[in-house]
Image: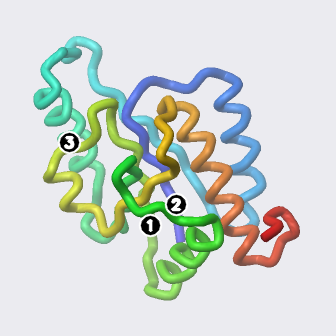
Amino acid sequence: MNIEIWSIGKENESFIDEGIAHYFKKTKPYNPVELVILQTPKKSATTDIEKTKQQEEELILKRLEPQYYLVLLDERGKMLSSPQWAQQFQQMMNQGVKTVVLLIGGAYGVSDKVRAEAKQVWSLSNLVFPHQLVRLILAEQVYRAFSILNNSPYHHS
């Protein structure tokens, strides 16, 4: 199963890139993970929230293939423990899912159309984090989930 982390926004700061690369390297023996940053064109920058969400929707839906299993990360989503993340990934693998997309929406969230495409909606925390930090947290949690599934000592429950 391939895992892709999609994130609306700008490129990462170097220290974030280093952290993500660290966790992706550790996850690679278990499962491939890729980060895809979806950037809206600079010239289309606007303060109109609905227009911004529409532009982001186009970027997401253009890339989203019908067979992808979309998990939306949203502050109003279901809060899962790390072992529950592992169980979710195991269930997806058991169902034969080829590609899981973990989507970090834009600053204003995602459109209703994108939300409707999501098979699940998860929340990382009741706290709000910057997008770059969420990318790093996701990379770590994916590694943690696969270390749990493979009985690695990394996760101590």
**Which x, y percent locates residue 119?**
31, 69
Residue under label 2: 3
The reply to whether the C-beta atoms of the residues labelled 3 and 1 are less than 8 Å apart is: no
- Please give the name of the residue rendered at 70% of the width and 41% of the height, measured from the top-left corner: 21
The crowd level at tag 1 (other Cα within 10 Å; few <14, some 14-19, many 20+) is some
Question: Is 31 drawn above or below residue 52 in the view shown?
Answer: below
Quarter residue 47 falls in: top left
The crowd level at tag 2 (other Cα within 10 Å; few <14, some 14-19, many 20+) is some
Q: Which amino acid does label 2 sit on?
A: Ile
Indicate the secondary structure of the residue bearing disc 3: helix
The reply to whether the C-beta atoms of the residues labelled 2 and 1 are less than 8 Å apart is: yes
Marks 3 and 1, the one that precedes in the sequence: 3
Q: What residue type is labelled 1?
A: Thr
**Residue ranking furthest to the top:** 43
Residue under label 1: 99
- Please give the name of the residue rendered at 28% of the width and 39% of the height, measured from the top-left corner: 109
Marks 2 and 1, the one that precedes in the sequence: 2
- Please give the name of the residue rendered at 27% of the width and 45% of the height, measured from the top-left corner: 60
Indicate the secondary structure of the residue bearing disc 2: strand
Marks 2 and 3, the one that precedes in the sequence: 2
Residue under label 3: 57
Residue 73 located left or right of residue 136? left
Q: Which of 124 and 48 is in front in this view?
A: 124
**Residue ranking furthest to the front:** 126
